[in-house]
Image (cartoon, helix red, strand yellow):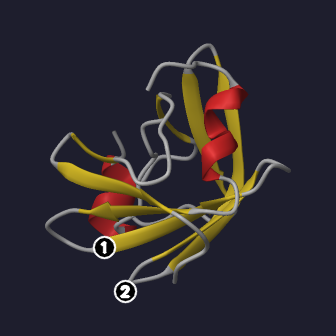
Amino acid sequence: MYRLLALATGLFLPSLAFAVGEEAMATRFGNTVVVQDTLATSRLWFQPDHTFRGSNWLMDVGGTWSVKEGTICLHFDETPPFRSNPECGRLTARQVGDTWEEEGRTYQLLEGVQK
């Protein structure tokens, strides 16, 4: 789902399962989304005020997120290399403890802020 963040930053737009509105984001607030691909392991942290932060071995990112019609978009403060801005993908709901695969990446939603 998130090719931009995987290549240059290892980050991604997390796929969030059944809800298609902002309520699908609720389980991410105060928790950590981990993305693993062949280049890096990245972490994303979402806030209810529509901001996010992310980090991997290469760089830190931040910006705002938005949800519309089942799509989540990350709007970066500074566009990471080789990425689009905004970067958007399908939104699905997930629960803390979930692990899933999408577009060659493994995602985990972990409890708490883990760096």
Q: Name the residue located 53 percent from the left edge and 79 percent from the top edge.
A: 114
Few, some or many residues within 10 Å of mark 2 (<14, 14–19, 20+): few
First in residue order: circle 1 vs circle 2: 1
Q: Tell me which corner region of the image, top left, top right, bottom left or bottom right, holds residue 81.
A: bottom left
Marks 1/2: CA distance? 8 Å
Few, some or many residues within 10 Å of mark 1 (<14, 14–19, 20+): some
Q: Is residue 74 left or right of residue 43?
A: right
Q: Secondary structure at mark 2?
A: loop
Q: Is residue 25 left or right of residue 79?
A: right
Q: Is residue 35 above or below residue 65?
A: below
Q: Nearer the viewer, mark 1 or mark 2?
A: 1
Do the numbered discs 1 and 2 sit on residues whose CB atoms are within 8 Å? yes
The residue lying toward the viewer, choosing from 67 and 109, is 109
Where does residue 112 sit, x and y in percent of width and height? 60, 70
Where does residue 7 sit, x and y in percent of width and height? 27, 63
Instruction: Identify the disc placed on residue 41.
Output: 1
Instruction: Identify the disc placed on residue 2.
Output: none
Where does residue 96 sit, x and y in percent of width and height? 49, 51
Q: Is residue 12 left or right of residue 93?
A: left
Image quadrant for the N terminus?
A: top left
Q: Secondary structure at mark 1?
A: strand
Q: Is residue 44 above or below residue 41?
A: above
Q: Tell me which corner region of the image, top left, top right, bottom left or bottom right, holds residue 60.
A: bottom right
Q: Is residue 97 above or below residue 32?
A: above
The residue lying toward the viewer, choosing from 73 and 45, is 45
Kind of residue at badge 1:
Thr
Q: Name the residue located 36 percent from the left edge and 57 percent from the top edge.
A: 108
